[in-house]
Image (cartoon, helix red, strand yellow):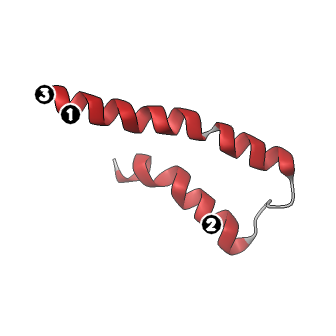
């Protein structure tokens, strides 16, 4: 669960700290799109926990 919760945020922090691929707008765009399933996973986990 920690990997699922921290994966996207940790990757974002890593790109800022190490400046890895930060100049490529296509990478930034794809990374931003990856936030959608990540946010859905977090929402589903909290929703499931509230129902049980």
Q: Which residue is mark 2?
A: 14
Q: Marks 3 and 1: CB-CB under 8 Å?
A: yes
Tell me the residue at 39%/39% (across/down): 42
- Please state the horizontal and vertical placement of residue 26, each as a whole percent of the image: 84, 44
CA–CA distance in space, label 1 to label 2:
30 Å
Q: Which residue is mark 1?
A: 49
Q: Residue furthest bottom?
A: 17
Tell me the residue at 76%/49% (across/down): 28
Tell me the residue at 79%/61% (across/down): 22
Q: Which residue is mark 3?
A: 52
Q: Secondary structure at mark 1?
A: helix
Which image quarter: residue 21?
A: bottom right
Q: Marks 3 and 2: CB-CB under 8 Å?
A: no
- Judged by depth in the image, the label closer to the viewer, 3 or 2, is 3
Q: Count residues near mark 3 (Cα–Cα under 10 Å), then give few for <14, some for 14-19, many for 20+.
A: few
Q: Is 11 positioned to the left or the right of 1 in the image?
A: right
- Please state the horizontal and vertical placement of residue 4, each as a whole percent of the image: 42, 46
Q: Is 39 positioned to the left or the right of 47 in the image?
A: right
Q: Is 20 positioned to the left or the right of 3 in the image?
A: right
Which image quarter: residue 52?
A: top left
Q: Marks 1 and 2: CB-CB under 8 Å?
A: no
CA–CA distance in space, label 3 to label 1:
5 Å
């Amino acid at each position: 669960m920690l990997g699922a919760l921290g994966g996207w945020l940790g990757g974002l922090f890593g790109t800022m700290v190490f400046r890895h691929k930060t100049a490529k707008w296509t990478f930034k765009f794809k990374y931003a799109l990856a936030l959608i399933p990540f946010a859905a996973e977090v929402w589903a986990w909290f929703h499931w926990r509230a129902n049980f």
